[in-house]
Image: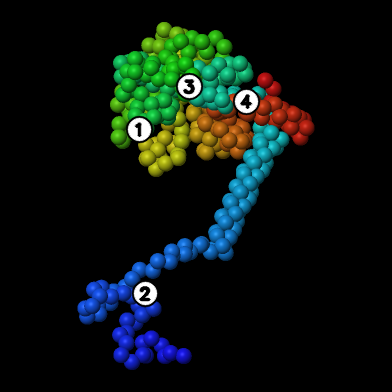
Amino acid sequence: HLPPYHERPGEPYFGPLAMLPLHRSRPGTRPEWTVQPSSRPRRQRKPSSSLTTYLWTAVAIFALVTYFLYRTLSNADVKEATVELEKLYSRPSPEYCLRKTPPLVCGHGGDSSDAPPNSARAFQTALQDNVPCMEVDVARTKDGRLVVLHARELAALTGTSGKQVSEYSWPELSQLRWGDSDEGVMPVKPLLQLLQPSLQTIILDVKPTLDDNMQPTDLPVMTSAVAALLREVPCPNCIVWGKFDELALALRQAVPGQSVGYVVMNETAEVRSAGWDVPLRSPEAQVTALHYAMASTQLLDLLHAAAKRVIVWTANAPHMVRLALDAGADGVVTSYPKMVQKALMQRRDACLRLYGHAPVG
């Protein structure tokens, strides 16, 4: 047996390179050794089969956990919605059952179940379902046309948020379309002429232009335009309301006998600082537009004692509708009027079964 290469006397030592093939650079001269690359092909290292298995197992476990969480949360949502609907339909309060007439159901921009609010199809659907009341958002264009449009629908139509209707002219708005349909933005006048003979109540929700401090910049002009519309298309079954109390006073002076309302809400600090949470603040108004979150039997009793008709807005979920109905609201504004109509029918049967009395109408 030979000793290890690096232990042989008189042989050069190259450390770890000692086992690599070597050759002389110039034969016949002093040895100068260089490394000769191996001619054997390098074997490619295959990935570990155990590592691949672990990765696929982890992916499978993650997918299963995600699926079961999704199903669990979805089932929980469905169960919660079912419970809320059951409470809405079959558990009316005694106060609700003892009232004489059921509350008025108002479609918020028509029926938004299958169409955008304030679109022609949404209003047509509500008419076909015999919804007795509708709320119409009224805004004014840059060139003075009153149109049926809210800022949120404007953002959906244009794909640009933060804009107001008054930044567009009527020719510009008339080019916009709802989705892939041929329907566009409607002027208020023809819609009012269409709805007025068919509905028990029409609510015109006036949307003035607002500055950075959320104060109206064109309220006198807006009020004059709405008053001119109501003189041109008399609407004794219309209620005109808005968030600014000056509107109600100015309209009562411009159109004597016109029903007007004011908005009561307390959602944000800005709203409260503006005084919109004060329930009794507009003596010239006959109607209070009350945000659903403020609806309570005590507040409704206070407003009714002041001879205010109370319409709660915008109740789109079962628990919101139940809150409004059991508090004693005279009307409920909702984007899904068919749900509320069904609730009134189911509640009538429940009232008769539980208390022997139900609202009639």
Q: Nearer the viewer, residue 28 or 45?
A: 28
The secondary structure type at the circle numbered 3 is loop
Q: Which residue is mark 4?
A: 338
Q: Farthest residue toward the bottom?
A: 9
Q: CA distance from mark 1 to mark 4?
A: 32 Å
Q: Nearer the viewer, residue 131 or 64?
A: 64
The answer to whether 322 is drawn above or below residue 207 in the figure is below
Q: How many marks?
A: 4
Q: Farthest residue toward the top?
A: 232
Residue 78 image position (x, y, % from top left) = 64, 41
Q: Which mark is residue 21?
A: 2
Q: CA distance from mark 3 to mark 2?
A: 75 Å
Amino acid type assigned to the residue bearing label 2 in the image: Pro
Q: CA distance from mark 1 to mark 2?
A: 76 Å
Amino acid type assigned to the residue bearing label 4 in the image: Lys
Q: Farthest residue toward the left?
A: 29
Q: Which mark is residue 162?
A: 1
Amino acid type assigned to the residue bearing label 1 in the image: Gly
Tell me the mark number nearer the camera, choosing from 4 and 2. Answer: 2
The answer to whether 313 is drawn above or below residue 196 in the figure is below
